[in-house]
Image: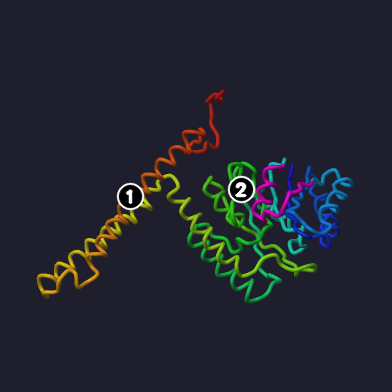
Amino acid sequence: MISITIPAFNEEESLPKLCERLTTSLVTLQEPWEVIFVNDGSTDGTAALLDEMAASHPSFKVIHFRRNFGQTAAMQAGFDFASGEIIVPMDADLQNDPDDIPLLLAGLREGLDVCSGWRQSRKDAALSRNLVSRLANRLISFVSGVQLHDYGCTLKAYRRDVIAGVKLYGEMHRFVPIYASWMGAHVGEVPVRHHARRFGKSKYGLERVFKVVMDLLVVKFLSGYAEKPMYVFGGAGLASFALGFAAGLCALYLKFSEGISLIQTPLPLFVVFSALTGIICFLMGLLGEMLTRTYHESQGKSTYMVKSTKNIPAKA
């Protein structure tokens, strides 16, 4: 079973054409499929139109949100309600091409666990969208170590087992390949087509850049330090102590070599603040360690994931 998941927010003009093209493309796959639309609190006729399509096509399924929760929440809902062993999210605005779905599935058949679409020729604004996107993709690839040209392309194919435990928040939907990579997934990409928007206007602006950068910091923290937060806070504490120690030495040098009184410089105050900051960082690190253990032990969360076993009976 292949599950196509599509978040939709005020896309009533695009949906009829999208459903037509989806049906034409998916019937050629010769395997079971479903399309899950997530109505993200649309205020136009999207909800009624989706219900009509679901009534006419048993393979079209619809989830209605009570209000607009954003693309990440809608994508998470699609993952949660999908029945297929392969999940393919895509946009509802006709900029992704359903005819590219077989290309992504071919990538999975060749051994990939995640096959990401790469919009080599984007039909968006050159400066505000394309240039910013290229810079963001390079930054994300550098920080995460997962090399992709186009994190922002929604059209991707995932094996269910590599995203089974993924929980998305904020603007984290673009980082799903990174989460999958943590699970040991083999991540790759294939070029896909990209069409100019035909109806409405983009729901995103330049303010998204700030959100992406902040979420990237969270991803970096989780990738390296989620299990050992003391390494982050303890490191900051040691750095603060080191600065305070250096400031103290400088104050003593000025006192005994230059005859400058301690109260004539801000260095003693800086030493005190640095020491307090260091202490606070260490305490936060200890608190983070306690929270990490509470998270794993209270919910029975394992610190590892087993892909397969042999000659070992399943746990009851």
Per the rendering, the mark at residue 58 is: none
175 is within the stretch colored magenta: no
Q: Is residue 296 left or right of residue 13?
A: left
The three-letter amino acid code for the residue at tag 1 is Phe
x and y percentages locating residue 63 in the rendered image: 76, 46
The residues tagged by marks 2 and 1 sit, at their Cα atoms, a distance apart of: 39 Å
Q: Is residue 169 left or right of residue 75?
A: left
* Local secondary structure at mark 1: helix
x and y percentages locating residue 157 in the rendered image: 67, 51
* Local secondary structure at mark 2: loop
Q: Decide: is 162 above or below 25.
A: above
Can you identify the residue that label 1 sits on? 282
Residue closest to the far right: 56
Q: Decide: is 310 above or below 90.
A: above
Q: Is residue 52 left or right of residue 191?
A: right
Q: Quadrant of the N terminus?
A: top right
Could you say which is closer to the camera, residue 100 or residue 277? 277
Q: Quadrant of the C terminus?
A: top right
Per the rendering, the mark at residue 113 is: 2
Tell me which numbered mark, 2 or 1, is placed earlier along the sequence: 2
Mark 1 closeness class: few <14, some 14–19, many ≥20 residues within 10 Å: many
Residue at position x 64%, y 50% in the image? 110
x and y percentages locating residue 120 in the rendered image: 66, 68
Residue at position x 27%, y 57% in the image? 275
The three-letter amino acid code for the residue at tag 2 is Asp
Name the image quarter holding residue 135.
bottom right
Residue bounds of the magenta highlight: 62-82
Name the image quarter holding residue 250.
bottom left
